[in-house]
Image: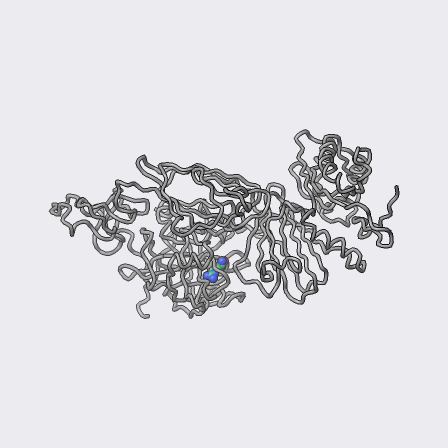
Amino acid sequence: MAHTFILDCFDCLPIWDPTLSAPAFPFFYIGGSVEIPNLTYTDDLMDPMSHTFILQAEALQNYFAEIYGSSAIGNYYLKSVIAAFSDGKSGARAYYWSTFWAPKDIVLPIKNLSSVYQKQIISKRIPAIANNTAKTYPLEEDFDIITMELFESDSMDYDIILKSATDLFWFCLPAAFDLYAKPGNNRTLTLLNPKKSFYQWRLRVPSDYVVRLVVVTSYDVVPGSCASHRLSAYDFLLPLQNKIITRWCGMTGAWKPPVIRLTSSSNVMLVTFSLDQRQKSNILKAYFQAVPKIVCGGWYVSWNGSVISPYYPSYYPPNIDCHWVIRAPLPGYRLMVKIIVIQIQEQSPGSKKCDKDWLAIDGVRYCKAIAEENRVKEYGYSISISFHSDELVTHRGFYIEFRAFSHTDRCNTVQLNCSNAKCKHHSQSCKEDNSCKNESQEGEEDSCSYKRCLPHSYKCLNGKCPIKLNPECDGIRDCADGFDEMNCACGRSQIKKFRIVGGEDARPGKWPWQASLQLGTSGHICGASVISNRWLVSAAHCFQDSESVRYSIASSWTAYMGIKVINKYSNNQAVMRSIKRIIVHPNYDQYVSDYDIALLEMEAPVFFTELVQPICLLSSPRVFNYGTVCYVTGWGAVKENSQLTKILQEAKVKIINQNVCSKLYDYLITSQMLCAGNLNGGIDACQGDSGGPLACLGKGNRWYLTGIVSWGEGCARRNRPGVYTKVTAFYEWIRQYIN
Ligand code: ARG
């Protein structure tokens, strides 16, 4: 029985010659991957045109043919194609598909048998070619092979490859881009005026990393028009129907923010784009990066906190299971849990419980959107939380918050328990209710001036917590040891008389805590604030190594203080100090910019002058609110995508309500962040201001360091305020180093 095939497009796709009679049987494809130990993954193996790739692929293809050809299903086997390689755990991983054709009724038995033969392939020896000499390498026992069905009910992507192969030769191959990102490296994917009907990007990262794809712009989503345009991401290097992470269809114009971030479960991802007509527009702008594979779950004892799905707010990876146990710190306390965000794959139609992906709290599974009133639930002393995702389709995930409370503790965490069974806000005392004896003697401690210490309370040197909300530096001794009135020489501009986006030039000496952090010949990189004669505080993200620059090395940095104009240090009042030590907050998370704070120790102390002064730190977490006068200062860009300024700029910004900001930023705002700016846009910090101060005028007419410039979407955009590190949340952390 002889059939004629035209093998087109680098011999990879069997095309039935239309002049011959149509095949009586359907084709079907089975794809998979196999790891070849001891075959080192090199750049050559990424390029399908390279000599190494071709030799290696041929050897494997022949080997597959031999096994299948001599097998019981040999009559139905056409060929196998090695489509790509990636970095494997102990070698290189090869991705292939095998083509079969058979009468309909025996397709299923063949599929089943095929996986038996695949196992046979791997249990024998797999050939690998190195330096042009054929070699075979033994395969390890626990060798893992993934076999899946390719393009079966989901055959559109493959159909396009087949269809396009009958067009002009140049058009026949889908445009394929093979990319590799090293850690710390962003590789871009763009599609401008597409001329072909099918594009694919095979994304790879080193083997112990996962791929994060960030889609910055794309066409609009119009559900239901998948046939004309679609963008798909797969958790594999081939478009396997059961490996789709997500898919967007339709096209009616430009996509708007927010950006979408997807994560793979291993070190590869395939992105495909298909369209039925040429398009004259910028269709896709995305980049990908290598993200360390995280271990999710854990055991926590805490008063409050949050639990998020892996890589949240990025889409969680397929195929993952996590388990957390949370316990209240003291017996008698219970946990209150609030589900803030839940966006996960819903159950299959007709199924009663979440059977695909789920979040389970104490055994109860959640996978659908939850009505506002059902989001908060009370649990016992400890809870178990688990998360499961299957192989297919992922979403943003979940974000939940928990808090320990006690029923005997009638007052909530920001309230005082007064002995007259009333709850009072911390800023008030119980005194007015005559609930405590007020007649303390001179030198005796007034029991009414202190309250039960909470995690964020201001603590005197003797460990007691004054009732007053911000006891420090107000000229009144609230601590018996007087600690609250020590270290008060801060936050005052010493100048007697008196830009950023939408800002203006600052007068010399008006912001004497402002420092410029400079790196060798690169000059100004970030801002910082002077908080003592030896210490500066800045943003953690300023000290993350990139591929070409080691930003984490303390000795390469110099801090300039007492300056107004960059590179004009002729006035001998400019103070320059080398940096001795950089302490990046241990919880800093570069992917969500959480805990974006770092302390810098200077090589030698600075002397305070009218141009160099420390800014005050505030111990209480919640003090400034909407309406407080705050200024952000820095030498950053005066508009998006522009250059640094020479003259220090200042801009007056408003503190924005945390919930409002959280909604504007799609719940990316953690409790270590605060937002400030102007919701109408026009006033903001920008690139180069990072690490610099957001100073708010507080008690005693002093300036307090409220925020550290951290991030924002663009600069000064409407409804995209600046996001700052909430310095008040780090008072204890800072104090442990600088005192
Ligand atoms: N990350 C930026 C920097 O490194 C600061 C961005 C602040 N952006 C904003 N829109 N407030 O300089």
| Residue 552 locus on image (x, y percent) | 51, 49
| On screen, residue 296 above or below 533 | above
For this rendering, which residue is in front, 583 or 556?
583
Q: Is residue 656 left or right of residue 525?
A: left
For this rendering, which residue is in front, 265 or 595?
265
Residue located at (27% from left, 59% from top): 699
In the picture as drawn, the residue positioned furthest to the top comes out as 141
| On screen, residue 12 above or below 701 | above
| On screen, residue 635 above or below 76 | below
| Residue 322 locus on image (x, y percent) | 50, 39
For this rendering, which residue is in front, 411 or 515?
411
Residue located at (69% from left, 47% from top): 151
Q: Picture quarter containing residue 248?
A: bottom right
| Residue 396 locus on image (x, y percent) | 52, 50
For this rendering, which residue is in front, 21 or 308?
21
Q: In this view, does 24 lie to the left or right of 588?
A: right
